[in-house]
Amino acid sequence: MAGFMALLISYPEYSILLMSQAIQWALDTFGLALLCLSSGIIIVCSAIAVSPLGRIKLGGEGAQPEFGLFSWLAMLFAAGMGSGLIFWGVAEPISHFANPPAFVADSQDLKDTALALTYFHWGLHAWAIYALAGLAVAWFGFNRGRELRISASFSGKPRPGAWVILDWLAIIAILFGVAGTFANTIALVQTGVEQSTSITFEDSAFRYGLLVLIGLLFMASSLTGLNRGIKYVSQFNLILMITLALVVLMLSGSLNSLWIALTSSVEYLKLLPQVSFSIAPESKQWSIGWTVIYLVWWVAWAPFVGPFIARISKGRTVRQFLACAIVVPTVASILWFSIFGGNALIGGATAAISDAVSQDYTQGLFLFFDGFPLTQVLSFAAIILLITFVITSADSAVLVCGLLEGENHLLNKLLWGLLLLALSMALVGINDVDLNKQIAIAGALPFTLVLVGQLIMMLKDMVTQVNSR
């Protein structure tokens, strides 16, 4: 693995180009299978939650939660989505509105449909993948006394032997997934700073400097431990995110935003049966470029988010875990997109924002803020939120890489942090948002099979325990 990473970092443009071509082939070939798998995961998670299995506590009947509900939800949400919601909050609904796929082109209300497509990418499908990955690790870790590692789903031995390969596959998926998001966040922060200060950064020095600064911050946070760094930064993220959303809600007219959330949610529920198990031939490229890439992106983050939310979820029932890990973040994401993307779609600047986003996805959010009072304050708050979210994600990724490797001492955290930083620098140098999305899913394609294996092993073990009572 070290040699592979060294090759990638030494020859970033050539290596990333080859990876991008391989990824595109895999998406074209297995796109429908990936879509059906993710939809099936929602059904399985729902069945587990309503069955007698849902009453089982993670850690046994006497286990108590380590974190309060607010802290738990804050860390779960910050690790699972974070800066992605800020990045795509305006850009994605506007993109779907301006360039809708053929299967919804005749929609009666394209604004609601554009938001519904966005919810499809960020809602139940995404969080069900995370929840499954987390539940499998938590089940075997807390209810079977194994380590919080991917390999523990397949082997109960202290030394997993050949199964350790699965932990390393997970680490690769984590590093690529977080690095791709890291690079996109840097691009958006640069746009925000340029638009807020009217200063244009012609070369890449600003991006590299910002990347190094964030790297120092997330490694410092990582070294303070879970109960201090990640916990407090996650709480700050959630409070600032709620505050920013409420301010935009009040400035835009709360009734409009709430009505948009309601009507687009109805459209989302109506759309789900149509898009969950099939890809329209006339919209295949759109589905591959948006839906399938997103689904694999969530799989790429699953080996990172899964063990992390497992680590913080001891003492929760299986039902509470699934409900809070799927439904609550989905509702929060819907509200976020309806407040930001929804208002961008009904405001007077829709055409201008659409033109800007078609040229550069990073332009949408801050152009949207130009239509409000307190433009500078909103922009500054979004920049701070982007930075703190990516700190939390990188911090959590370093923690999970250590857990999966079985070494979580300070030097180990530092080494993983430096490797993540180096990989992100390679992507920042190229500065291509769409390419970052593809590279973010590079490690996920082989891990998809691992996720299926975890599901099978977990269900088999759960049913065995219930039948033995």
Image (cartoon, helix red, strand yellow):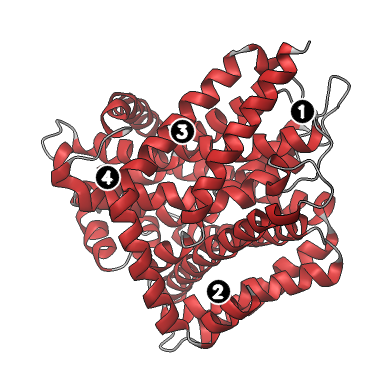
Q: Is residue 64 left or right of residue 187?
A: right
Q: Nearer the viewer, mark 4 or mark 1?
A: 1
x, y percentage for residue 259? 34, 27
Q: Contact, CB < 8 Å: mark 4 with mark 2?
A: no
Please, what secondary structure does the residue beneath circle 3 have? helix
> What is the distance, in whole Å, between disc 1 and disc 3 at their CAs?
22 Å
Task: Identify whether 455 is placed above or below 199.
Answer: above
> What is the distance, in whole Å, between disc 4 and disc 2 at their CAs?
33 Å
Q: Quadrant of residue 364?
A: bottom left
Mark 1 or mark 3: whose residue is earlier in sequence = 1
Amino acid type of the residue tagged 3 in the rendering: Leu
Q: Contact, CB < 8 Å: mark 4 with mark 1?
A: no
Amino acid type of the residue tagged 1 in the rendering: Leu
Q: Which residue is mark 2?
A: 424
Q: Is residue 425 left or right of residue 22?
A: right
Amino acid type of the residue tagged 2 in the rendering: Ser
> What is the distance, in whole Å, between disc 1 and disc 2 at their CAs?
35 Å
Query: Which numbered marker is on residue 345?
Result: 4
Q: Nearer the viewer, mark 4 or mark 2?
A: 2
Amino acid type of the residue tagged 4 in the rendering: Leu
Query: Which numbered marker is on residue 124?
Result: 3
Q: Which residue is mark 1?
A: 58
Q: Is residue 110 visible?
A: yes
Q: Is residue 253 visible?
A: no
Along the line of sight, which residue is nearer the eye, 169 or 397?
A: 169
> What is the distance, in whole Å, between disc 3 and disc 4 at their CAs?
23 Å
Please, what secondary structure does the residue beneath circle 4 have? helix
Task: Identify whether 51 is placed above or below 24.
Answer: above
Q: Residue at x 54, y 48 (%)?
A: 81
